[in-house]
Amino acid sequence: MGFFDFMTQEIAIDLGTANTLIIHNDKVVVDEPSIVAKDIILNKVVAIGKKAQQMHGKTHKTIETIRPLKDGVIADFSAAEQMIRGMIKMIPRRKSIFSPALKMVICIPSGITEVEKRAVKDSAEHAGAKEVFLIHEPMAAAIGIGVDVLEPKGNMIIDIGGGTSEIAVISLGGIVTDKSIRVAGDNFTTDIRIYMRNHHNIDIGERMAEKIKINVGAALQELEEPPANFAVHGRDLMSGIPKEIIVTYKEIARALDQTISQIEQAVLAALGQTPPELSADIYNTGIYLTGGGSMLRGLDKRISLKTKLPVYVAEDPLRAVARGTGIALKNTENFPFLIR
């Protein structure tokens, strides 16, 4: 190890629509919601991550909460830069009189445009990165769950995040077939809010919809181990008075049905574009599910019924992409698919 290696800090960033994870020295050192709270009058960031999320939907006129990423890409350049900078400061580090040079590997959606790639790199460089590599999310997810992406064998990965669902067939260190759709976890949350308005006449916030998704979210109306009914709190649309109702997983499965169907169609489209030799591999190995959306109850079974293929949910699916990005960070010389 050279002297200057001590002056370089290597970090891997899973820059997600819903959550951002940072890996340093093979450990997840930052796991925060991708949200920023800003004082409009002073034009100053007042909170990042969990603290900003606690303010979401509860702010007064002078403070606004911003989600810098939309559909997996940067929507607010300034807020994204400040969020990345703030989260890097959260990394535990030794006290030093020198600011270390940063080497970053950041994951991006496979359907991202050149302009959007440039926005990610610019945000990272403005936040202090001297060297930036980009990796596509399905590739990072495959590496994160232990798939040898360099071997001549087809593996299908479905990564359902907050803003995008990434479906890819990987072989020989490259993405052979990919389908990136801007339908994912955020759409589930929106579906739940709309369902509550239309069927229960109750207005709920984003955080309550997220709680419903976690507690009783389901992809099938018949589950072997159904979750307990969930108490929902919101505002009655007729009277304006706070109200409580009880919802079941079957209701939420109905609410999410159309959005899940869009993901199913994208999976079928990706399979339809896959070369026959790789299709044979996928028939034997099955499909791997990663990302927060893969934790929706019964989703693996529903996709399996649709494709007639075995479907496996990765262990710790929320961190699969982050783990893969961390492994890529240590192998920047050996992974030819990294984008400089």
Image (tube, helix red, strand yellow):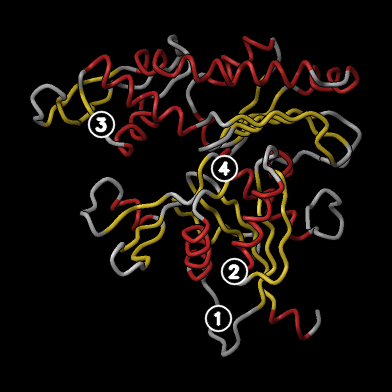
- The residue that disc 4 covers is 72
The residue identified by callout 2 is 126
- Residue for point 57% across, 42% down: 72
Q: CA distance from mark 4 to mark 2?
A: 19 Å
Q: Position of residue 280 (x, y in %)?
A: 86, 17
* CB contact under 8 Å: marks 3 and 1: no
Q: Viewer-proximal residue, 220 or 138?
A: 138
State left or right for residue 237 relative to residue 163.
left
- Give the spatial CA distance, label 3 vs label 2: 37 Å
Mark 4 or 1: the one toward you: 4
215 vs 61: above or below:
above
**Whether residue 49 is situated above or below residue 280 in the rendered picture:** below
- Residue sitting at 66 percent across and 71 percent down? 102
| Residue 78, x across and y down, in percent | 49, 61
- Residue 204's disc number: 3
Q: CA distance from mark 3 to mark 1?
A: 44 Å
Residue 334, percent from left and from top:
87, 56
What mark, if any, has residue 94 been given in the picture?
1
